[in-house]
Amino acid sequence: MNGYEFIFAGARLTMLPSGALWWGEAKMLTVSDLHLGKSERMARRGGAMLPPYEIRDTLTRLERDISTSGAETIVCLGDSFDDLDAAENMHETDALWLTRLMAGRRWVWIEGNHDPGPVEFGGTHLAELYAPPLNFRHIARPGAAAEISGHYHPKASLSLRGRSISRRCLLYDADRVILPAYGTYTGGLRSDHVVLEGLMRLETIAVLTGPDPQPIPMPRSLK
Amino acid sequence: MACMTALPALFQSWFAERDWQPHPHQLEVLNRADSSAIMLIAPTGGGKTLAGFLPSFVDLGESPAPGLHTLYISPLKALAADMRRNLGKPINDMGLAIRVEDRSGDTSQTRKKAQRADPPHILLTTPESLALLLSYEDAPRIFASLKRVVVDELHALAESKRGDQLMLGLTRLMALAPDLKLIGLSATVEDPPALAHYLHHETEILIADPGPDPKIAMLTTDTPPPWSGGGGRYAIPEVLAAVKAHKTTLIFHNTRAQAEIFFHHLWLANEELLPIGIHHGSLSREARGKVEQAMVGGELKAVVCTGSLDLGLDWGDVDLVIQVGAPKNVKRLVQRIGRANHQYNAPSKALLLPANRWEIIECQAAIEAALAHDLDGDPPGPGPRDVLCQHILIRACSGPFQADKLYREVRNAGAYAKLTRSEFDECLNFVATGGYALRAYDRWQRLRQCPDGNWQLRDPRAARMIRMNIGTIQDTDTLKVRMKGRGGKALGEVEEGFAASLVPGDTFLMGGQIVRFEALREMVVQVSRDRGRRPKIAVFMGTKFSTSTQLSARILKLIHRDDLSALPSHTREWITLQNTVSRLPRTGRLLFESFPHEGRAHSCIYGFAGRGAMQTLGLMLTRRMESAGLGPLGFVATDYATLIWSLTEVTDVDTLLDPDGLSEGLDGWLAENALMKRSFRASATIAGLIQRNLPGQRSTGRQATFSSDILYDTLRRYDPDHLLLTITREEALRGLIGFDRVENLLRRSTGRIDHVRLDHVTPFAAPLFLEVGKVPLDGAGAETLMANEAAKLMEAAGLS
């Protein structure tokens, strides 16, 4: 698989250009923070009416990753829907599309803070998933090990001779992996934010998403 | 019908007591007090604002009835506040019971509430505050008694979307107060009828005696200016001498960065410690306020400044204006010179300081144009529709409305007079439903049509959010700069992109001092004082002006004159040499030079279309050269020419410059252009798709907010005909990147290209080699750059 390969807790993992995590041995594809239905939720709450195409865009990328990887298990690591109503109000075409993607595969919905309950789509609903040796949950738990999580939408920037490029990124150290947000309408939290700095070890690597994922030492604030 | 309205006795004696004579144009405004719209053009110091208010004073008289009578709108908050003090004087002297208050974003909530409940007779405000007032449900009550509106600095407002918003607001006011009279006040402009029409379709124009012609000259120096670059540092001794010889001097620069650098070097040479300050839009409000105070108090000999002092208060004793760098635009030059016009009947005095050889010619051309009263300017375009979208939202906040009526109403604004019904309906549809090809929000429409046909907010609570988004001023992404340490002093702002490129230890200029970058903390750039002498240059945002078309035409004519004696000898020799070695660019033809230099083929195109357009031309031609296999490596553009270097020489000039198919494949390039994305963000914010960043809101960099670039890319992919993309494209093509100028240039040059092939660099092309801002063509792409940089970092960290 094209991407950045690394060994974590004894498992050989690959971050794909899109920011999805591929675990070849288990044929498992993990994506985090899809935030499907974000535009619908904003409009419902009287906010701006954003272009209603983000579900389409996110599913297009997900479909591509599933077909190129040949994944048999898909783990959605929480905040898959922007809220539970957003899951219910999904446009019929989009809902059918998602159902079709799920067909014939093991599909695990991990609960997130945005979607704390089961949604009407099939699949397995779990608070956490233990797939030895890895633990999958939405929000990283301090002190945990071999943990794969999302929630924070990490991003990092790299300075290139006077210009600065900022990308979503995956963070990993000896204990945990934090996945970038996969959804189209998602922002990012800079890796030098106090929360991420506190959570991650000093020798953390940030892997930038993009056609050719690049690892860099996680940018930290200057102390 | 010039029947002489006598100034009421009270006013006559007020003038008489002061030994003043009312100016003829002040009386004329009073004579025409019943005209539905007047525009008064008068120079600074001509008692313009008093003229604007005289009809109100006379009408209100000694014991006015309660209620809002006159609205005064200016582009500057400070001007509104200052006006309150200025008006207080005649009102008190004459014992008029007229209540004057100002209202802006700085006014307290309590005051604002009180003003709505019990409006003053005269309210001084800004376009944004007026828009906000109009969004309230009680707008009809507040404005029912309104008789007059005075719009100050109309010429400046007309150049931005703030003016468009104001004009739409005026159409609303005229609907609420049908008998309303408008007065527009303006500095000298090139096309008074166009500006008058912008204010109102039936505007009478009054032009006051402009006073004596200004005295403008080039600042002569012992050393000739450098071949390229800007800033005018070479002339610092002469500038200091001029400052010393005058009471107060304004030293105008075209960019903030140049103002900072010049100020820094001015002080290094200022051995007599003449009190000289600096004023520009990136400095903190406190810093600017201090300089303004010192200025009014007559404590400063000079102020180094930018467009931030183009408008505003009469600074009293300014008796000299120095323009550093070519003025780019004759109208702005004339208006800046007017800043030295402290006495109406005394000529103002100005010196032009060209920063390089080309600018000598441009300055001379500008001086001639100013003396010939030949002002430039682009004809105003149609009213931007993003502003109209916001206007519709504001209208909806104040209560239900009929689409037909609103359409008729907005067309009363000059800029929207030609708006078609379908263009209007597109905006209404966008505001109501998002206007997407995919009908996704029928349940959650922002506006909904009631059974009686009226439109109204689906959820009245949305009004709060809409109000927070009112306005058209874009805060570019800037970060505050503060001294390190607790409660560190605020110095000003820099562009976010600039801040991101800083590494600790980098130094730059801010408010005239060199500071050292320490850290970026909570979106604040923390700095410390630095004792070094060579700062890294600060890149502020701020517009880079392009030379106007009219001024460019004058430059072309000037170099062809038989008598070049108006120019210094070194410049004359340079022009003559170019004529001998190659050719002089000519009006109506396009000069294209080809020559080798340092093993590369070079092409120099003298388009004289202004920097923005010449830059765009460079991008378009190198794209064509790329597909023709000529191996373009880079280019650089100035206001006058574009220089391209490539592996292979261009031989088929006509095909390269063929205007047909120019826009083919341009869409893709345009769409990826960072300027387009910036333009989209601006329009999307104004039109209400994106919520404006409120101060402090961006500070956390939360994961919930995402970049407008994502929306832009999504729309392009799934809804390419969406209204906002149309608006973005219209704006970018018109203003941002000068595409129309490029197209005009190539169209009129077809079959009129002078291709000169030489074996060495030409005199006119030589300065281009020294230009900064070369654009490298990145065949390898950002990904490769990134991979290299990432590998280096990993290695340095011992992680590879």
Image: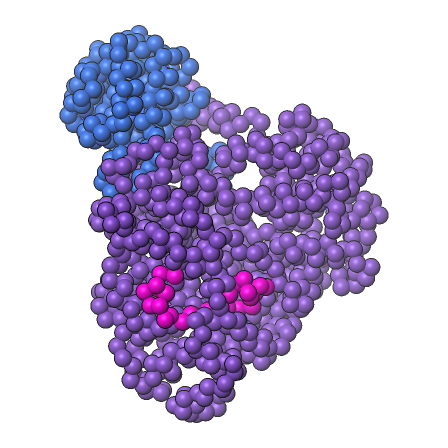
Chain colours: A blue, B purple
Q: Residue A165 falls in which quadrant of the image?
A: top left
Please provide percent x and percent y for residue A29: 30, 15
Is residue A109 visible to us here? Answer: yes
Q: Nearer the viewer, residue B68 or B366?
A: B68
Q: Is residue B210 above or below residue B330?
A: below
In the image, is residue B181 part of the stretch drawn in magenta?
yes
Please provide percent x and percent y for residue A139: 21, 27
Query: Residue farthest to the top?
Result: A25
Magenta highlight range: B171-196
Q: Residue at x 30, y 19 (%)?
A: A97
Left or right placement of residue B179 versus residue B371 in this view: left
Left or right placement of residue A94 versus residue B765 in this view: left
Query: Residue farthest to the front?
Result: B452
Q: Residue B286 falls in which quadrant of the image?
A: bottom left
Please provide percent x and percent y for residue B263: 54, 59
Is residue B525 visible to us here? Answer: no
Q: Nearer the viewer, residue B159 or B795?
A: B159
Please provide percent x and percent y for residue B118: 23, 71
Q: Residue B431 falls in which quadrant of the image?
A: top left
Q: Is residue B6 above or below residue B361?
A: below
In the image, is residue A147 part of the stretch drawn in magenta?
no
Q: Residue at x 36, y 12 (%)?
A: A67
Q: Residue at x 47, y 71 (%)?
A: B38
Q: Is residue A31 above or below residue B143?
A: above
